Image (cartoon, rainbow, N blue to C red):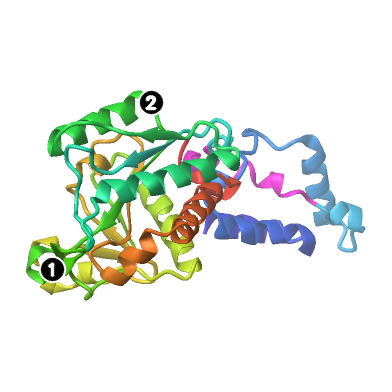
Amino acid sequence: MIFAMAAMVLLPIEVSDAGWLSDVFKGSPKEAKAPKQGKPSKHVTSRKRAALTKPAASPKRRTIRLAALGPVGLPSAAFKPAAPLCDPSKLRVVLDVGHTVESEGAISARNVPEFVFNLHLAKRIEEKLKAEGFAETKLLLTEGKAKHSLFKRVAAANDLRADLFLSIHHDSVPNKFLEDWEFEGKKSHFSDRFSGYSVFVSRSNPDFKTSFAFAELIAKEMKAQGLDYARQYSQPIMGRYQRELLNKETGVYRYDELIVLRKTRMAAVLLEAGSIINRDEELRMSSPERRDIISSGVTAAVKAFCEPRWAMLGPL
């Protein structure tokens, strides 16, 4: 309303200049450069006086810069400078390889530990990011059993002062959905009922806004690559594994309790790249082609995060 009232006062503004005003309403206040406060210059004041006394002002006199809006009583927050633009060579992305050798995570339909899938995909993402100029990308491998290793990886990411934290995983299903079968003479389990990727964020993360923005970018890139997200997490049949779906178009879920998301001091996202308990999807997840698709999507998401329009999300 303040901007609109000020615009009405400055009616002699040319149409080409007034287009800037619509951009103010569309964008974040942080994107607007703060005008200098205080009294308007004599030059601008004289032009205003001339506009009032001469109805048929020349185009030169009618061209009043919107910097004249400076004296209007705007909130100080409107002039908060945008965060520094992201420098790819300095952006520190930590790629957390989910699970450990001692705590392997889920077991695939063909008896391959999740940790193996996670490691191969994380390494491919690291290669792609570094090839795109993100030289500070770090691959995080931890040791130890379950919960202890979770706190170790959080501490490592915090010590590295990472800007973005991405934990790489591959999905399974609750035990009640598992079916028995044999693969190469060994008993195993599978569930072909569900498939797809999913992206998780925690509202307990100290920078949830940026976490969610980064998660959205990853999910949109996965979708753009022709992949579908796992829809079962929003369904009551999942019981205690049911999660709030924050974006039904892309597959971003809320999972507040995940240690690696809520204890890290930077924006943090967990990606379940696909289901390895689904026999068909397991084969796809094992292929270099699928790893390339996913790593390309993640790399595109990091690049998009680094563009100027994302600077409003906070300092990197």
Q: Which residues are magenta?
A: 64-80
Q: Would you place residue 248 above or below residue 128 in this image?
A: below
Residue 120 % position (x, y): 39, 47
Q: Depth check: 134 or 42 in front?
A: 134
Name the residue located 76 percent from the left edge and 48 percent from the top edge.
65
Q: Would you place residue 32 above or below residue 56 in this image?
A: above
Q: What residue sits right under mark 2 in the picture?
A: 160
For residue 280: magenta?
no
Query: Could you give the CA–CA distance between mark 2 and mark 1, rounded to whole angstroms?
Result: 36 Å
Name the residue located 60 percent from the left edge and 55 percent from the top edge.
24
Whether residue 254 sits left or right of residue 89 in the image: it is left
The amino acid type, in three-letter code, at marker 2 is: Leu
Whether residue 117 sits left or right of residue 67 in the image: it is left
Q: Depth check: 11 or 239 in front?
A: 239
Residue projecting furthest to the front: 185
Residue 253 % position (x, y): 28, 60
Q: Secondary structure at mark 2?
A: loop
Q: What residue sits right under mark 1 in the picture?
A: 238
